[in-house]
Image (cartoon, rainbow, N blue to C red):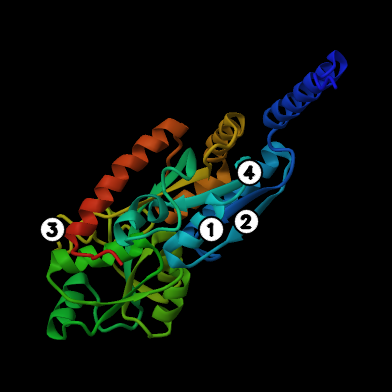
Amino acid sequence: MNRTPSRRALLCAAALTALAASGIAQAQTDFPNRPVTFVVPFAAGSATDQLARALGQSLTEQTGQPVVVENKAGASGMLAAQQVARAPADGYSVLITTNTTQAANPHLYKKLPYHPVKDFAPVSGLGKGGQVLVVKADAPYTSVGELLAAARKAPGTLSFGSGSSSSRVAGELFQQMAGVQLLHVPYKSNPLAITDLLGGQINLMFADASTGVPQVQAGKLRALGVTPTRRMAVLPEVPTIDEAGVKGYDMGYWFGAYVVAGSPAAAVDRLNGVFAKALGTAPLQAFFAKSAGVPFPTSPAELAAFQAAETEKWGRVIRAAGIQAE
């Protein structure tokens, strides 16, 4: 019996293959043609969440497609990163994240449920910012010097909360450079740590500006210092921690967008263009003004190179702070 495919069967198969390829190409060129999901590693109200929602609004305005912002807080961002890493490689699941998941976690944890490089395709840098050292408004210390004096008087009794690797490393580096011992209390996100700080359950924290500054301006928290080497325009009267006596202290953080590795190049390019345009809009400019940050648009290749350099830098900072991988 002759089982050789007929010419007609071969032509049909070729037509189906061409149709499928055409469908894939069309799906890539009209991206997005359905809702996009932004996965955020931190809780609602965090700086990353605020940024993601502003970006989502702009994406909807530019493309007509809705954006679902999903907060997957916990485990220093690992839950969110793992979720996106396991999503279909189609560009519709976007990780709006920070140096926590992409540069710091590899040095803080011996085993990660995702690979910061192999599992993701960089899309664009989004922004850079600084942190603020805050205490409760009625705390007995009104300066970094008074806080350090209290910490030296009772080593290991003052507690600092952190809801991200940036927040934690800022506190750990502060201890190392100032020669004091504090008690670290981890949280799923910075807003949760702020809640306990306001309630008196912890003594201090290094909060991203967009989370901490509004509480300072409302009179609920007191800012003792800021982590960059320059003062923040939103808190011009607050000294840098370097100015306040911990010489050489300098910490910051950054935001970036990633999709699943292997996602169509057309989807990555489209998202990159959408984000670049979004970062120039009034809502995003307002976000950065409020958070004492700056926009940081990049090409995918530039973000990949920046992430590699940042991973090396965060490794040096974490080792210098004496933090042991968990």
CA gap, disc 4 and disc 3: 41 Å
Under tag 2, what secondary structure?
strand
In the drawing, does residue 252 fall left or right of residue 44? left
The residue lying toward the viewer, choosing from 184 and 326, is 326
Q: Separation of disc 2 and disc 4 at Cα?
A: 13 Å
Up the image or down, 317 lies above or below 160; here it is: above
> Mark 1 and 2 residues: CB-CB less than 8 Å, in contact?
yes
Looking at the rendered image, the disc whose residue lies closer to the viewer, 4 or 1, is 1
Q: Residue at x 27, y 58 (%)?
A: 227
**In the drawing, what numbered circle is on residue 170?**
none
Q: CA distance from mark 3 to mark 2?
A: 40 Å
Q: Are marks 1 and 3 in contact (CB under 8 Å)?
A: no
The residue beneath circle 3 is 247
Secondary structure beneath dot 1 equals: helix
Quick one: SS at disc 4? Answer: helix
Which three-letter amino acid code belongs to the residue tagged 1?
Asp
x, y percent for residue 84: 55, 52
Q: Nearer the viewer, mark 1 or mark 3?
A: 1
